[in-house]
């Protein structure tokens, strides 16, 4: 099959087409991987503001930085932690300290060795103050016992699943001490050409077009990566991504790269596969957020009424062509550990919503109850439609709506820096562990002006903060799950922001790309194991 | 005066294409004016199943878009937006252009130098990028789009006005006015401008067509006002479905094409009617 040219592919019989469509993740283990080749990838969004954004900055920089920067561990599809830069992480009996054994023989792209000093620097200077935010609040000290052993000490007990999730999560990237020490990590210009331990080195970033990575010949895992070259390219719109796939200019696209109606057309020939695995640890939702700095939205009844005025099923069916489902609660329904159905539901009912607004003191006066500005973040094509739909849904309640769908940069600024909105439509992707990726949208310490994808509503509730604080130190797994459900119930009743739909994203990939989608967050994986059967 | 108008109409009508253009423009204006009666509902309302093809369901003669909104209603209301932006932008451009051009030519010297360098500065910036910049700075409001289009399209009008004024400013009738002690402003507005106006009007009518295209481009790129129905936005929204439901792009695309063509034809007709000297060129 390997010697197939493109033309052969087109004239294969039905049987061969079936066989090739089954290839990919399923048969990956049975075949010997091939070295070499260039893989061109993209995702269903736009170019990042910088290749690496230390505090987070959303999926776009996360996608580009994770090919270069690695973490200590990673989470597999079946939710098990696997070693990456650390070979072992063990808690003490009281869960107040963790011993991390590091991998031997790892070097940074510039030749310097990776040591325990790097991890100590990351823990104290990068993770705790910048990327992990509240999740490492109780971290007291990090100590390099020997060049390959680090001990993290905490003020309070830290649950094992929680700490490992932080280290395997978006905030756990390991950056080089010798480059960042003494500088401002966030503004260091090296973030545009990050230096890491990963399988790929940044060759060049052509702004407005693509970033090119070359194989790291001295990667710690011999034989990896399989690819010689990786290119991440950005397209402005989904239709042109579909065209690029068909023209052979694109091999893999994560997170809904092409228009939903085109998925069937592209995959029917057997040349492309639509893969839904690989998103468990970055579960995407589309949220609606009510700015708590506006007096109207300080009233819980108003928020609940507006939530009830939105037909989530319509959004799932019409905007996402069925590749989404109405959300229930604050936790994504794909979360195998923490999701619960036992939360307040907001079934679509305009009449009830209208009555609730009457009762809350906002009757229709002169044809309108009140006026609000609706900002729908323009980073996904779908948000344009959702914005237009939500505007109509609110207008059905006799609310005057001024809709704006700004571009990515302006949306980030208006929602997360200037708080210049009444109601916002945004997206986020949460990990399976709820702290902080889900909780930071609700807790008081999630309010960080200018930090994207945090608590932008300004909502603050001591009771909710307390539940999350308890979750942070509870080491007994069942008790922790019970606390998570308490959090979910309270957050859903309060509704300062809530997911409207849980997305079920797809990766579109050429059938000759192998070994993809094998981890719980494939988009943020290093892609070292990907290979091309050409 | 009546004789003049009849003469004008006859000269205009001699250009058959211009008549067709005029007819089309009248149809577009008619649709725009009648929109609230034809489609009493908000055109951006979701009314039916998404992606109903044109001529399938008689309730939605031009079909529905990807959200289930009536394309016919959006086209009708879009005509209002398009014409309004076209007219206002053209008016803005004409006002700025005439003011700059007339002042430069009439006074000459360093004023002329300064104003013309200023005009050239505007001319060197690519128009569409300039429009997008202004809109992204000011915000996604239909007023700002209009202003932005006006700001980028005044330069040819300024240069044309200047040329006309240069030719006229030293003619005997102007000198006579000066000798009579008329003020500069009165000479410019009352004496020279009416004589310089015909070619400027022709150009202004073409600016309307250009403005329609600019607005479409801005909306297509998602920078238009999302609260207003517009042809460009309809194309932009339908772009992702171009492989399956191409009519969502094609219907408004056809509307834009016909309107711009019609405006250009009318411009040609105006040229023939207002510049009889050039008729047999």
Image (cartoon, rainbow, N blue to C red):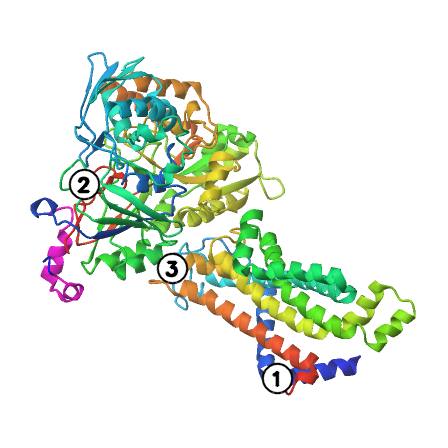
| Residue identifier under label 3 | B51
Is residue A20 something that shows in the picture? yes
Magenta: main secondary structure equals helix
Against A471, is B134 above or below?
below
Quarter of the figure with residue A446: top left
**Is disc 2 on the same chain as disc 1?**
no
Instruction: Give coordinates of residue A276: x percent, y percent.
Output: 23, 45
| Residue identifier under label 2 | A518
Quarter of the figure with residue A199: top left
The mark lying in front, picked from 3 and 1, is 1
The residue drawn where x is 58% and y is 42% is A368
Q: Chain of mark 3?
A: B
First-in-chain label (3 vs 1): 1
The mark lying in front, picked from 2 and 3, is 2
| Residue identifier under label 1 | B15
Mark 1 neighbour density, 10 Å: few (under 14) some (14–19) many (20 or more): some
Instruction: Give coordinates of residue A369: x percent, y percent.
Output: 57, 39
- Name the foreground residue: A324 vs B11: B11
* Residue bounds of the magenta highlight: A4-27
The mark lying in front, picked from 1 and 2, is 2
- Name the foreground residue: B161 vs A451: B161
Q: Which residue is most to the bottom?
A: B280
- Name the foreground residue: A281 vs A130: A130
């Amino acid at each position: 099959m390997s010697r197939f040219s493109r033309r052969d592919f087109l004239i294969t019989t039905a049987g061969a087409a079936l066989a090739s469509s089954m290839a990919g993740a399923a048969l990956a283990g049975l075949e010997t991987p091939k070295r070499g080749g260039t893989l061109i990838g993209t995702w269903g969004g736009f170019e990042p503001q910088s290749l690496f954004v230390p505090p987070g900055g959303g999926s776009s920089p996360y996608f580009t930085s994770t090919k270069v920067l690695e973490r200590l561990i990673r989470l597999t599809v079946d939710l098990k932690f696997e070693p990456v830069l650390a070979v072992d992480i063990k808690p003490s009996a009281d869960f107040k300290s963790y011993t991390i054994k590091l991998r031997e023989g790892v070097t940074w792209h510039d030749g310097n060795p990776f040591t325990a000093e790097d991890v100590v620097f990351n823990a104290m200077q990068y993770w705790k103050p910048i990327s992990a935010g509240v999740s490492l609040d109780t971290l007291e000290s990090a100590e390099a016992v020997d060049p390959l052993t680090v001990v993290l000490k905490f003020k309070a007990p830290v649950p094992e699943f929680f700490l490992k999730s932080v280290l395997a999560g978006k905030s756990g990237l390991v950056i080089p001490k010798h480059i960042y020490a003494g500088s401002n990590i966030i503004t260091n210009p090296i973030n545009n050409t990050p230096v890491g331990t990963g399988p790929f080195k940044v060759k060049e970033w052509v702004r407005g077009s693509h970033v090119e990575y070359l194989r790291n010949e001295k990667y710690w895992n011999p034989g990896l990566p399989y690819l010689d070259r990786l290119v991440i390219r950005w397209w402005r719109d989904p239709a042109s991504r579909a065209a690029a796939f068909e023209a052979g200019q694109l091999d893999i696209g994560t997170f809904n790269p092409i228009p939903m109606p085109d998925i069937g057309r592209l995959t029917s020939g057997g040349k492309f596969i639509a893969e839904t695995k690989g998103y468990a640890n970055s579960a995407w939702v589309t949220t609606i957020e009510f700015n708590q700095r506006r007096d109207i939205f300080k009233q819980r009844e108003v928020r609940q009424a507006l939530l009830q005025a939105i037909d989530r099923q319509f959004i799932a069916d019409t905007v996402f062509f069925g590749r989404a489902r109405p959300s229930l609660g604050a936790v994504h329904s794909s979360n195998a550990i923490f999701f619960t159905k036992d939360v307040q539901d907001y079934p679509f009912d305009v009449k009830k919503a209208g009555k609730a607004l009457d009762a809350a003191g906002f009757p229709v006066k002169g044809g309108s109850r009140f006026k609000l500005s609706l900002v729908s973040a323009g980073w996904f094509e779908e948000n344009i439609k959702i914005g237009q739909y939500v505007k109509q849904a609110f207008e059905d309640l006799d609310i005057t709506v001024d809709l704006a769908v700004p571009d990515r940069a302006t949306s980030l600024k208006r929602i997360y820096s200037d708080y210049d909105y009444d109601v916002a439509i945004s997206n986020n992707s949460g990990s399976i562990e709820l702290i902080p990726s889900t909780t930071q949208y609700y807790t008081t310490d999630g309010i960080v002006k200018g930090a994207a994808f945090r608590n932008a509503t300004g909502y603050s509730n001591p009771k909710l903060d307390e539940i999350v604080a308890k979750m942070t130190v509870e080491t007994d797994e069942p008790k922790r799950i019970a606390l998570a459900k308490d959090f979910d119930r309270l957050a859903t009743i309060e509704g300062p922001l809530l997911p409207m739909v849980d997305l079920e994203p797809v990766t579109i990939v050429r059938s000759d790309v192998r070994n993809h989608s094998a981890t719980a967050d494939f988009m943020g994986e290093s892609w070292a194991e990907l290979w091309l059967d050409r | 005066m009546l004789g003049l108008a009849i003469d004008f109409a006859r000269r205009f009508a001699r250009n058959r294409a211009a008549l067709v253009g005029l007819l089309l423009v009248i149809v577009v204006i008619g649709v725009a004016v009648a929109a609230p009666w034809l489609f009493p509902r908000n055109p951006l309302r979701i009314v039916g199943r998404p992606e109903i093809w044109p001529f399938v369901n008689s309730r939605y003669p031009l079909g529905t878009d990807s959200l289930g909104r009536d394309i016919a209603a959006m086209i009708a209301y879009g005509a209002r937006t398009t014409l309004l932006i076209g007219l206002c932008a053209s008016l803005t451009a004409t006002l700025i252009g005439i003011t700059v051009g007339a002042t430069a030519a009439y006074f000459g010297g360093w004023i002329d130098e300064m104003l013309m360098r200023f005009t050239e500065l505007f001319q060197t910036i690519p128009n569409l990028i300039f429009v997008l910049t202004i809109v992204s700075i000011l915000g996604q409001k239909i007023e700002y789009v209009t202003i932005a289009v006006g700001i980028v399209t005044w330069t040819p009008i300024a240069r044309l006005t200047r040329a006309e004024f240069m030719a006229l400013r030293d003619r005997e009738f102007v000198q006579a006015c000066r000798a009579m002690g008329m003020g500069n402003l009165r000479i410019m507005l009352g004496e020279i401008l009416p004589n310089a106006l015909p070619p400027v009007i022709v150009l202004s009518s073409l600016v309307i067509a250009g403005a329609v295209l600019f607005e479409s481009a801005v909306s297509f790129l998602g920078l238009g006002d999302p609260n207003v129905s517009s042809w460009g936005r309809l194309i932009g929204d339908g772009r992702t479905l171009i492989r399956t439901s191409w009519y969502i792009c094609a219907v408004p695309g056809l509307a834009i094409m016909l309107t711009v063509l019609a405006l250009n034809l009318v411009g040609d007709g105006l040229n023939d009617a207002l510049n009889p000297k050039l008729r047999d060129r």
